[in-house]
Structure formats: structure tokens, C-alpha cells
């Protein structure tokens, strides 16, 4: 076998190894994002029109999130929030629409105290998606009902469902124990 043939075979093998390594690295990165963001990964793929754009967006969210100063709550603050939540639930019987509004406000207050910006709903979704992607659909569903309830366009059953959805995110935010 000539030297040129041997060099060509080695070059082709090296290219194949490099392509395989890049493919494995990209697949591992995709799996990491899918595991981290849960259902939010697929939603972002759909919203962004493809995997590459979605993965760029999700990595940008991670970078933004890394700059936030997210804090754990001390046990006494978690207990206080739990008591406040029970009060919101108790108000539901007499004031379902008001309770949904209170639940939204309490979730926003908890987010703010934990260190999440609460300026706008879309920003909240983006920032929460990094660590709370598995409960984000609950927040979307609850927020939708809250918005419609402002125009008295919801049933009591929908309002009850919103409370359940808010509770899922509330519990996730309240019990989140960050490892440092």
C-alpha cells in the first residue's frame, strides 16, 4: 500500500471520528437540555421553529438565569408562605375570582423573594423555565384563567383548576432546595 493511500485512509478515518464525536456531543447536549427543561424543551422547539434555534434560546435562558441571585427561603419564611397559601384557599369558597388573583399575587411575591424578576409574565416564564420547567404548564394554565376571570369569562370549575395549577408552581417554588 502506498504512503498516499495510507494517508488518505487515515484522513478519512479521522474525519469520521471527528464527525461522530461532534454528533455524540450534540446529542448529549440536547439530552441535557431535554432533561433540564422537560416539556418546556418541546414547547420551545415549536415556538422557535426548530431544534437549533430552540437550543440557542434555552442556553440563553440558562445564561440569564445564572446571573440572577436566586435564593433559598429560610424555614420560617417557607412556613409563613404556607400559612398565607392556606388563607388564599380558604377565601375561595366565598370569592373564587378574588382567590385566583390572590394566588397569582402570592406566587409573584414568592418569586420576587426568591430572586426572580417579576416585571412581566413572559419574562417570568423564561426565568422560571430553567429550574421549574416541569411545572411551568401549570403556571400558564393558571395565568390564562386569571386573565379570563378579570372579564368574568370563567366558570367556578375553571377557577378551581387555576388554584390547583397555582398550587403546583407554588409548591415547587416553596420547596425548591438549591444545591450550592
Image: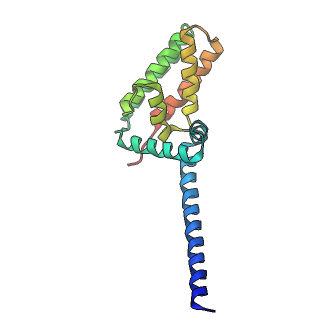
Q: Is residue 83 visible?
A: no
Kindly indicate the quadrant of the structure image that contains residue 37.
top right
Tally of numbered discs: 0
Residue 174 relative to residue 6: left or right: left
Q: Can residue 121 be seen in this view?
A: yes
Residue positioned 60% across, 71% down in the render: 16
Q: In this view, does 107 lie above or below 45?
A: above
- Where residue 160 appears, as percent x and y from the top left, is 61, 17
Residue sitting nearer the eye, 60 or 1: 1
How was the colour assigned to the protein in this rendering? rainbow
Residue positioned 53% across, 16% down in the render: 100
- Where residue 58 appears, as percent x and y from the top left, is 50, 43
Q: In this view, does 162 lie above or below 97?
A: below
Residue positioned 45% across, 41% down in the render: 61
Q: Quadrant of the N terminus?
A: bottom right
Residue positioned 54% across, 16% down in the render: 147
Residue sitting nearer the eye, 5 or 169: 5
- Where residue 4 appears, as percent x and y from the top left, is 57, 87
Residue sitting nearer the eye, 91 or 71: 71
Kindly indicate the quadrant of the structure image that contains residue 68.
top left
Q: Is residue 60 above or below residue 81?
A: below
- Where residue 163 appears, as percent x and y from the top left, is 56, 21
Amino acid at each position: 500500500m502506498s504512503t498516499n493511500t495510507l494517508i488518505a485512509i487515515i484522513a478519512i478515518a479521522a474525519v469520521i471520528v471527528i464527525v461522530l464525536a461532534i454528533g455524540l456531543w450534540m446529542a448529549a447536549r440536547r439530552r441535557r437540555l431535554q432533561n433540564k427543561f422537560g416539556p418546556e424543551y418541546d414547547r420551545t422547539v415549536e415556538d422557535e421553529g426548530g431544534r437549533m434555534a430552540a437550543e440557542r434560546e434555552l442556553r440563553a435562558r440558562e445564561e440569564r438565569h445564572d446571573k440572577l441571585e436566586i435564593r433559598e427561603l429560610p424555614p420560617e419564611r417557607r412556613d409563613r408562605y404556607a400559612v398565607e397559601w392556606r388563607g388564599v384557599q380558604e377565601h375561595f369558597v366565598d370569592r373564587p375570582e378574588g382567590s385566583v388573583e390572590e394566588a397569582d399575587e402570592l406566587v409573584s411575591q414568592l418569586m420576587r423573594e426568591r430572586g426572580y424578576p417579576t416585571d412581566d409574565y413572559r419574562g417570568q416564564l423564561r426565568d422560571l423555565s430553567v429550574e421549574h420547567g416541569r411545572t411551568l404548564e401549570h403556571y400558564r394554565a393558571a395565568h390564562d384563567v386569571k386573565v379570563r376571570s378579570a372579564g368574568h369569562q370563567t366558570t367556578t370549575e375553571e377557577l378551581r383548576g387555576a388554584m390547583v395549577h397555582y398550587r403546583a408552581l407554588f409548591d415547587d417554588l416553596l420547596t425548591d432546595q438549591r444545591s450550592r
